[in-house]
Amino acid sequence: MNYIVCIDDTDMPGTRGTGWLVEGLCGILEEKGLARTSAVSRHQLFVHEDIPYTSHNSSMCFELSLKQETIEPVINLMADFLETRSEKGSDPGLCVAEMTEGLDREALIEFGRAAKVKVSSKTAAYALARQTGVHLSEHGGTGQGVVGALAGLGLRLLGNDGRYRGWYHLGRPGDIVKVETLCAYPFVDQLVTRNGDPLPMDAHVHIGSEKTKTVRMDHRRVIVVTANEDAVHTGIPFRTITKKEAKEY
């Protein structure tokens, strides 16, 4: 994947979220043969009364690999898509960065981290976009979504923030499953503890809830496990985290 794309603020209360729209966009890019796309990750930003957001103030990111020579036609398609498909009253922002050696990752990551704990401005976002050479554009409303788009891109670059879209039924609560079995799924790179320590492939875990979500940790798509409350009785030290616990990521 040689580009990262981040989109923010395309929805309104009572409508489908930005993640749903972004997945549709990825499907169009694939169908038209313009690019291959990755899984979409959701990145939580600061919730504050001075920040306009629909429900959670989160941005959506994915990576893409071009199937042509230039990115411009893809950016134009994405811009048109946002302008025609975003909900009326939303403030869509689009950020695209090429993954080159010269990309100032640290500056972008710093902006993303700051946007998780304080209010950031459009002025600062555009200034950083010019400094780092990334594409940043607004496509409706106030365009305030450019802040979240740039911040989300930085957090995707960080590699230790966010959770991926989609819930998976990998067993019933209490089922005992081998780590190797779970890692055989194409959307699971590793099972790790909350500290990021990988579990050996021959280990076993309890399924903690009916739905399992993957999160982004160390640039991988992982299932996080935590201490199993029934370990004394079952001998299984870990269980997958619940839906509520996954929201911490």
Image: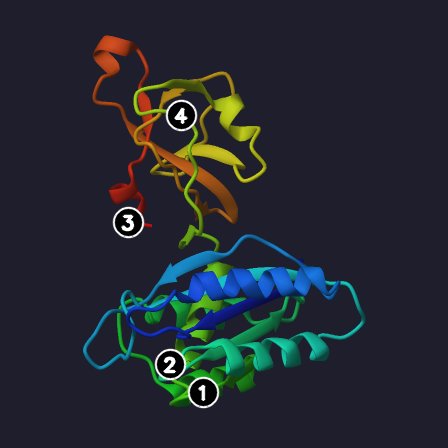
Spatial CA span between label 3 and label 1: 31 Å
Q: In the structure shown, which secondary structural element does the residue marked by tag 2 occupy?
A: loop
Nearest the camera: 135 or 54?
54
The quadrant where residue 16 appears: bottom left
Q: Which residue is mark 1?
A: 140
Q: Which residue is mark 2?
A: 90
Mark earlier in primary sequence (1, 4):
1
Q: Amino acid at mark 4?
A: Gly
* Residue on which disc 4 sits: 171
Circle 3: residue type: Glu
Q: Residue at x 40, y 54 (%)?
A: 162
Residue type for callout 2: Ser
Q: Marks 3 and 1: which is nearer the front?
A: 1
Q: Position of residue 13 (x, y in %)?
A: 28, 72
The secondary structure type at the circle numbered 3 is loop
The numbered disc on residue 248 is 3
3 or 2: tag closer to the N-terminus: 2
Quarter containing the N terminus: bottom right
118, 77: nearer the viewer: 77
The alpha-carbon separation of the residues under discs 1 and 4 comes to: 43 Å
The image position of residue 95, as x and y in percent, is 53, 75
Residue 118 visible to an observer of this rendering: yes
